[in-house]
Amino acid sequence: MLLRILCQNVNRSSVVTHTLLETQAEKYDVILLQEPYWGYLRNIPSSVSGAGEEYQGTQTHPHWTLFERGGPTRVVTYINKRLAPTQPKLCSHIVNHPDLLLVAIPQGPRLTYILNIYNDGDCSALHYLSAHLPSLPTIDVMMGDFNLHSNIWDPNCGHSDRAVTDLLDFTDNLGLILLNTEGHPTHIPHARHSVRASTVIDLIFVDGRIATSPSTSFSIDPSGRLLSDHNPLLLTIETDIEPTPRSPRIKRNSDAEKMFFAECTLEISGLYPPPPLDTINDTQALCDSIFSCIAQAFDRHASTPSCSYHAKTWWTEECSATLARYRATRSPDDKRSYRRTIRSAQRQHYDTIIRETADKKR
């Protein structure tokens, strides 16, 4: 299958994170975030306070499995739950650093390793990788915010940071190839910092066989920046990952369920009067006929569910409209409108869940 990866520094914005998780589940299989939101999420029951205790963390979502180290962090990875049957794994026993996250997705006899990186001003992530090079597996994809400037990937840059040599030595030793060398900006300073020029500091490295594959494609998406100051990096690669398809089902209390029961009743009643049941073969033949009626009716009315493993989420048509308007104008007024709409939709959705839960307990 084609594995589709989105990578972005979200500038600690909960709104950007919520938007990506809600809107990209049909388009992408893996989301790599740098500088994610980490803070208050909700109150949880407490033995010492009637109001509960504050629960802090980063966002989760029913479409995605969150991989994180725990505690405040600068990298998190989300894997679409349609890949859950492959049993992706967090490889903290291989890479154990707060600004690095290595995830392995099984594909046949081997693993696809994806490394999410945030390299701070001290290059602590890069120094860790260089020191642990002998123990690293073959990395298939390495993406993230490297915070390094060089005219190798940014023609408008007049110099190269000293750590660039260390990065290139590391990638050469692992056989990784840089893809985004054309100078398309990835870091766009906010308006209040407009004196600073746009730069290329978010990079895509892939294994050599992936770099030369005709199925590999990548791009920078300026329209997907949202409230962050980093453009998303988009990558598609060919893999042997084979997620188990979800089984068709009939939604409970739906019109499809009513029609299924009605057809089963009609078809089975058509078997009356039953044939003689004098032998085991006679009984088996009647059972086969009944099961065949049920199976055929099920096939006619069952459908494969979408990637969501839960009920409806909070995203609304108004959210989509305000997001599209902000992407088109990038104006401060539309930015504020987008924030308000997202938060209002979330608040109304969760208030409804609370009311429904309370009503069920009465």
Image (cartoon, rainbow, N blue to C red):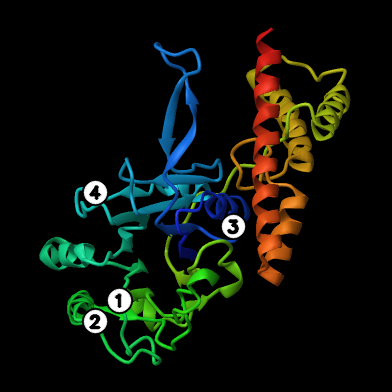
Amino acid tagged 2: Asp
Amino acid tagged 1: Leu
Which residue in the protein does label 1 denote?
148
Of 226 and 181, the residue lying toward us: 226
Q: Assess whether mark 4 and mark 1 are in contact (beta carbons under 8 angstroms).
A: no
Residue 195, position as x, y percentages in the image = 47, 79
User: Marks 1 and 4, how far apart in space?
Assistant: 25 Å
Work out whether mark 1 precedes mark 3 in sequence or the reverse, and give the earlier one: 3
Residue 87, position as x, y percentages in the image = 39, 46
Which dot marks residue 92? Answer: 4
Which residue in the protein does label 3 denote?
24
The secondary element bearing badge 2 is classed as loop
Q: Please rate how many residues cluster around mark 4, counting C-alpha atoms within 10 Å: few if below 14, some from 14 to 19, many from 20.
A: some
Q: Please rate how many residues cluster around mark 1, counting C-alpha atoms within 10 Å: few if below 14, some from 14 to 19, many from 20.
A: many
Amino acid tagged 4: Ser
Of 171 and 358, the residue lying toward us: 358
**Residue at 24% from the left image edge and 81% from the top image edge:** 161
User: Marks 2 and 4, how far apart in space?
Assistant: 29 Å
**Residue at 47% from the left image edge and 64% from the top image edge:** 5
The secondary element bearing badge 3 is classed as loop
Residue 224 falls left or right of residue 13:
right
Answer yes or no: is residue 327 visible.
yes
Work out whether mark 2 precedes mark 3 in sequence or the reverse, and give the earlier one: 3
- Residue 149 versus residue 285 in the image, above or below: below
Work out whether mark 2 precedes mark 4 in sequence or the reverse, and give the earlier one: 4
Answer yes or no: is residue 208 visible.
no
Q: Assess whether mark 3 and mark 1 are in contact (beta carbons under 8 angstroms).
A: no
Residue 218 falls left or right of residue 257:
left
